[in-house]
Image (cartoon, grey):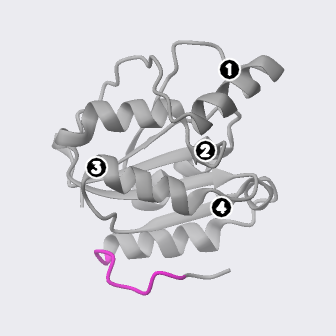
Amino acid sequence: MKALVVYYSRTGTTKKVAEAISKALGCDSEQILDVKSRKGVAGYMRSGKEGMKRLTTDIQDTKKEPKDYEMVIIGTPIWGWNMSSPVRTYLENMKDRLPQVAFFCTMGGQGDDKAFREMEDICHTVPKAKLALTTQVVNKNMFMDRVDYFVGKIKDGGKEAEEGPE
C-alpha cells in the first residue's frame, strides 16, 4: 500500500511517533509547517487557545499530494482537548483530496476521542485505524508495540479489534 504520514509537531513528540510509523510502513512523510512561531510560553498559550476554540491557522503549502496515495495517516498533538490548529487547517484544505485515512495523536492526558471524532467529521470518513499516545509514553520510548499494532491494523485494512496492547 502506498501511504503518506502527515503530521504537525510543536515540541517533537508527534514527530517522533510519525517517524516511527513512517519507518514501520516504509512510506513517505510530510510535516505540516506553521507560519507563526509557537515557541515558549506565549506559543504554548496561543496553541491551547486555538485548540479550545477550534480555530484554523496559516500553514505553509505542503508538497505531497494526498490523491497520489492509497492511505494518508494524519497525526496531531492534542491542544485544549482538540486537534491542533495546523492539522485542522490541513484537513479543511485537503478533505476532498484524501483517500483512506488513519489518525494518531499525542497528548498530555486526554482529548483523543473528541479530536478523532472531529477529524472524522471533517474528512467525512471513518479512519482505518486510530492511535493515541501520551507524551509520557513517547518520551520514555515505550510506544513501539502500540505503533506496531496500529501499523498492523492499517495493513489489515482496519479489520482487527479497536483496542490494542496497553
- Please report contact status of discs 4 and 1: CB closer than 8 Å, yes or no: no
How far separated are the C-alphas under marks 4 and 1? 22 Å
Which class describes the residues within 10 Å of circle 4: few (<14), some (14-19), or many (20+)? many
Spot occupied by residue 114 in the image (x, y as percentages of width and height)? 53, 57
Spot occupied by residue 32 in the image (x, y as percentages of width and height)? 46, 29
Which tag is nearer the camera, tag 3 or tag 1? 3
**Which of the labelled discs sits on residue 133, or is there none?**
4
Instruction: Please determine whether, in this image, residue 112 is positioned above or below residue 35.
Output: below
Q: Secondary structure at mark 2?
A: strand
Instruction: Please determine whether, in this image, residue 134 is positioned above or below residue 94.
Output: below
Which tag is nearer the camera, tag 3 or tag 2? 3
Q: Most prominent secondary structure in the magenta stretch?
A: loop
Q: Which residue is mark 1?
A: 38
Q: Which residue is mark 3?
A: 123
How far separated are the C-alphas under marks 3 and 2? 18 Å
How far separated are the C-alphas under marks 1 and 2? 13 Å
Which class describes the residues within 10 Å of circle 2: few (<14), some (14-19), or many (20+)? many
Which amino acid type corresponds to the residue marked 3 in the rendered image?
A: Cys
Q: Secondary structure at mark 4?
A: strand
Which class describes the residues within 10 Å of circle 1: few (<14), some (14-19), or many (20+)? some
Q: Earlier in the sequence, mark 4 or mark 1?
A: 1
**Which of the labelled discs sits on residue 97, or is there none?**
none
- Tell how many labels: 4
- Please report contact status of discs 4 and 2: CB closer than 8 Å, yes or no: no
Instruction: Please determine whether, in this image, residue 97 is positioned above or below residue 157.
Output: above
Q: Which residue is mark 2?
A: 77
